[in-house]
Amino acid sequence: QMKRFIWLFRLIVFVISGSVVMAAPTGVRLASNGAAHVDVVISEDASERVRDAANELAQQLERISGATFEVITGDGRVGLAVGTYRDFPGLGLEDRFNPDEPTRQEEYVLRTHERGAWLVGVTELAVEHAVWDLLYRLGFRQFFPGPTWEVAPELDELRLAVDTFEAPDFYQRTMGVGHGLMSENRPWHDQWRDRNRFRSALSISSGHTYGSIIRANQEAFDENPEYRALVGGERRGSKFCISNADLRRLVVDHAVRQFHDDPERQSISMEPSDGGNWCECEPCAEMGSVSDRVVILANQVAEAINDLGYGAKYVGLLAYHIHSPPPTIDVHPNIVVRAASNAVRGGYTHQEIIEGWQARGATTGVSEFYSVFVWDSSMPGRQKASDMPYIRESLTRFHRAGARYFNVAVSDNWGAAGLGAYITARILWDISEADRIDELFDDFLERAFGDAREPMEGFYRLINRIGSDDRRPLMRSDMIARMYRYIDEARKLTGEPDVQARLDDLLLLTRYAELFDVYQAAGGNARQNAVNDVLRHAYRMRDTRMVHTRPILAHLARRDRQVEQVDTETVADDTPFTREELDRILSEGIKNTEVVDLPFEPVWFSEDLVPARPLGLEEFSKGSFGNPPRGRNEYYLWLDEPGEVRLQATGGHITHYRHLAGPANIALHAADNPVEEPIAIEDETVLPDGETYHVLLSTPYANLHRLEAQQSSNRVQIDTAEPDQPFTIQIGNEEHFRFGHFWTMNFYVPKGTRIVGGFAANQAGSLRDGNGKTVFAFDEIETPGYFHVQVPEGQDGRIWQLNRVRGQRQLMTVPPFAARSAGELLLPREVVEADAAQ
């Protein structure tokens, strides 16, 4: 009975999955000793795209085996049959495919037999997927874009045995590059997506669209101002008065016209314009929440476009900011809602957002942000894309929750984010690959670096989190020093030109990191020279795609008010890197950097900050920023709801330089807004005259905000105008606040912490525990130097204080965030959640 049950179970699994094979697949010998044993076969009616795929297969097989593979026409019974199922009707595969189902447009059969193999798909795109799948199984890899990161094995014997029916586990797999690509890099980026099956047939549009609807129907909106949202007593902005039935009819008619004009169109976005300013009229309020209003309009559009007779059509939405909370009404099944991972509101977790929308009938997906230049500056070790445990956990969680549509924002910085992007591509197609990250990493090291794999494993473990126990590097100077030394060791172990070329790319990445580190620490004229060096180096290495050159050139100097703008032509140096110059970069890099052996183990903390209020911390003695800080400085704030940030600002603290200074520049950024530009700027009010000015900055976002403040040729002091406003600074390695003189700030020591360790630039001041007792005086260290203090019994889970210190301090074993009081303190979310639960 048991054996019968097992046999029946296996049969059921085979029928359901279509990809579990009862017996071992029949193998085929493709080539040996430089001679091909099969041809590549296409039908006489093959499309140009299929012919291109067949020719690509033949060329790559020749490259791998040294044998010449002919592309001929035939019925597919003999040879490597490349085409759609309609190209080879004699193979009897019609029942395996459903060409009318939008979510099944990438399926293909990959099956070897004694006389060849089938690479047969439902569409041309599926055929291309089959070609690259077969080549992957033979050892071909396209790890990162471009020829340098292409790996083709050289095999005397070419054999393959496979029998599988393939379909992607995420229907939509799209990648958006924030700030765009250099024109010469776009073809390589597109090629990478093709070769890694990161190009999907079904793509749901969900960009902000209300504004475009207004522009397309400008005359109607001009004649009917009541179509617009009522805000502050005025009909204005790019939001709709959705309670207006005529407005809804106009939007539906607009959508219907799009599909009449293009019946092949798959979807249309009904995602609102960004920001706030939703309609405040009473009828809109009676419709329900903002999410309800968004769904009511989207439902009407979905019903209309699916009644046109053009097949299944989709409406795209985001669960985003104010309309991220799930609605209270049902959602049309052809509405695809992508939950934005960085824009959750209403007290929900991201997972609860997904599940809540699904409960109302929505088809769900996810929008992710793996690398954004304004967040990471292409510096290694900072991106979600370099965090393999996060990629594994999040993608499996999304898939388990039923999300099947995935869009990720990345940068063209493959040095820092490439490994994560490559592994993401594997997992999005086959979710079981999430359990093979260690194997995928090992395969990457072996194929990309060969004999040099051991030091390069150290290199990649330095700039990526591979395992759950790995931590981010906390000391950037130490990280750069080790990167140089790993490359030096790897170069001594390999004589392969292909491997050497990859090491050269990573050497240029390391040099960029060193130059950027110098730039961030520089001031005055040195800062201008340093930013020029960064821009020139990034331009020269642009064809490596190791760093995202386009925003580096377009935004780096523009965002830094301490330097003059730099024209691209000024830094557009096309001089290629010679072997001598590369050798010099490596030798000087090793000479100019130093590996640091710390007397304690640094601890990594996220920058996902939340109020420390849930911890119920006792107030310490009030801290102080001291004298107004130098240069550009950043403060972190928190708002429970969208609204206003009220500040007090005083400029011109260097009296004898007031005549050289202009008004202070104060810019507000929202963590939930991935766009480069600030959401509010004040650059006129705060004059360099020593007077205190009141500054009001409006924000359509809640939660974490970042404030940038600076005054050229002078100093500006910023303070909150509301005593309960969280107001925190960072004093870690990544972003150091430039204190003016002596200062006193409070920080948190998480529960279970045994050592408080860090770096001090001088010997001034002391460290106090939660009782106010001095536990360390900085005159005990060399200048500069690292310090560490044992946490006394009962002093963890409390506020400590850096008292009357001067200059730079870095906290390296506790969250590197400080405030004048516990009420102003923001801490990493993981710390607050963990300690509040104890």
Image (cartoon, helix red, strand yellow):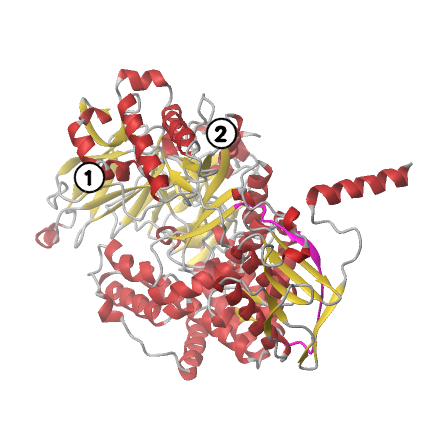
- Image coordinates of residue 150 in percent, x first then y, are 53, 70
What residue span does the magenta drawing correspond to? 154-171
Say which of 157 and 606 sits in front.
157
Q: As drawn, is 44 to the left or to the right of 439?
A: left
**Amino acid at circle 1:** Ala
The correct choice, above or below, for 87 with respect to 256 in the image is below
The correct choice, above or below, for 477 with respect to 433 in the image is below
Q: Residue at x 76, y 59 (%)?
A: 25
The correct choice, above or below, for 15 with respect to 499 in the image is above
- Assign the C terminus to one quadrant of the image: top right
Picture disc at residue 357:
2
| Residue 285 in sight | yes
| Residue 601 in sight | no
Q: Residue at x 26, y 60 (%)?
A: 523
Q: As drawn, is 290 to the left or to the right of 600?
A: left
Picture disc at residue 649:
1
- Furthest toward the right, the residue is 1
